[in-house]
Amino acid sequence: MKKQPGWALPNLKDAQVRTTKEAVIEKSLFQIPEQIRLLGQGKKYYLRTYGCQANERDSETLAGILEEMNFTAVEHPEDADLILMNTCAIRKNAEDKVLGEIGSLKRLKRKKPDLLFGLCGCMAQEEDVVAKLLETYRHVNLIFGTHNIHRLPELLYDVMVNGNRSVEVLSKEGDVIENLPVRRFGKHKAWVNIMYGCDKFCTYCIVPYTRGKERSRMMEDILEEVRILKAEGFKEITLLGQNVNSYGKDLHMEGGFAGLLEETAKIGIERIRFTTSHPWDFTDEMIDVIARYENIMPFIHLPVQSGDSDILKIMGRRYTREQYLTLFHKIKERIPHCAISTDIIVGFPGETEEDFRTTYDFLEGLKPAFLHIFPFSERPGTPAVDMPGKVQPSVATRRVAELEELCGRLHGAFCAKAVGSEDTVLFESTLRGGMMFGYTGSYRRVKAPYDRTRINAICRVRFGAMDESHDLMGDILD
Ligand code: SAH
Ligand code: SF4
Ligand code: F3S
């Protein structure tokens, strides 16, 4: 496909450049010119989100922008005039799923020739994906990346008014753009970005290439967002970053993430969560703040990736199995009721059966509350692609299954420990059969008979039996 004038295509080499320049923090008020603002009048959009919470939160901004342009949201792609896919590039199977969906949705264009397709998010930042989209998915009208979602109005204008196929993907370190519109998808739980990007460059991971450098929002902007959410009645917020522990380092501020967490806690919103923490720079001050504030939930997602120090080394994770173990136990000692979950990659290049057994035994001894298990996936442009010792997919699949079984046991034991005890639960949704469910601070899932007045409320609950999916049956006490 010949590059058209005005297109900006992704470039993975440019995407990995890191300079010492500070990120620009753009605070000017976001405004959509009048002739663009009316583009969505009478038109419907369907937005589908893949991937992590960062993407969920980006989709809330995309929805906010589209609604300022007078588009209306619909729940089925069949009803839409604009279909927008906010995509994830973390593993190849996630990408194949998106490409399959885009292919199958093409049929809708036969019935509605004016239907527009857009793709954004992390997949748009990849050279080979964009080349493929341009070549073989000719019904895709609009491609933009993670650095320029605020440009959506102008890009849509180019597509809808000028009739162009619009491609604008920037491979740069990235800015911090404040004051974008947001349409929160939840009523009681909200995501709050505290920083963007990642500079860790773990050797398997594409995120530093798709999301740019680590850059923090100003503390005051974050706290103001939390104050507004509290005033709007939100009960729970999750502070988001690829590695929240790095918060503030680029701003050369004192206190870092521990300081931000403490200031957030003082605002008094009922529940505070955060994700993700990298074990490498998890400080004692952070543990201390989590221990001291009741409204910081006792749950930490602390990805280990492997229980074998040699594999950790070639993954570029910057800690050994022993250092992880020390941190894990330090947290447990200081906050005994704190639950810790983790991520594991199986079948990393060079992972022998013995290395895998080491990881298995490590996890069995460690007893995290939950395991997220991923088979290693080669990501274009990352160093792991060229590493020797590829693991057969059938071997990786079997190792995943073994860990799934272990996870079942560990999570079952973790939930069962709560039977007979009391805790608070934020009930959030209804289930079939006249039930509702919610979570404790430590992420145990609890079911109770449906009561409309309890939805979006934090209730004190006593836990009875646990069912086969590890849900606890709750008796509401107050
Ligand atoms: N920033 C977070 C992780 C974000 S990605 C952290 O470092 O903790 C979420 C998870 O996806 C990772 O923890 C890892 O387990 C998994 N993952 C990332 N790249 C992967 C790859 N190439 N193949 C398989 N799993 C991967
Ligand atoms: Fe990826 Fe590592 Fe950054 Fe997490 S810390 S996003 S795994 S590079
Ligand atoms: Fe996926 Fe991008 Fe998040 S690759 S996991 S959507 S940062």
Image (spheres, helix red, strand yellow):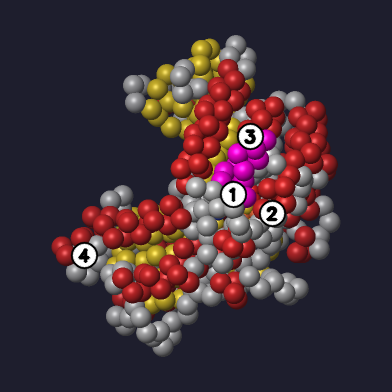
Circle 2 sits in a helix, a strand or a loop, which is it? helix
Decide if residue 200 is in sight here.
yes
The residue stretch that appears in magenta: 341-358
Q: Residues within 10 Å of mark 4 (few under 14, many from 20)?
A: some
Identify residue for label 4. 109
Tags 2 and 1 in contact by the CB under 8 Å rule?
yes
- The answer to the question of whether label 2 and label 3 lie on touching residues, with beta carbons closer than 8 A, is no
Instruction: Name the residue beneath numbered marker 2.
Output: 314
Which residue is the site of mark 3? 357
Q: CA distance from mark 3 to mark 1?
A: 14 Å
**Hey, what amino acid is under mark 2?**
Ile
Q: Which residue is mark 1?
A: 348
Residue 454 inside the magenta-drawn segment: no
| Residue 444 in sight from this viewpoint | no
Lower position in the chain sequence, tag 2 or tag 3: 2
Element on which disc 1 rests: loop
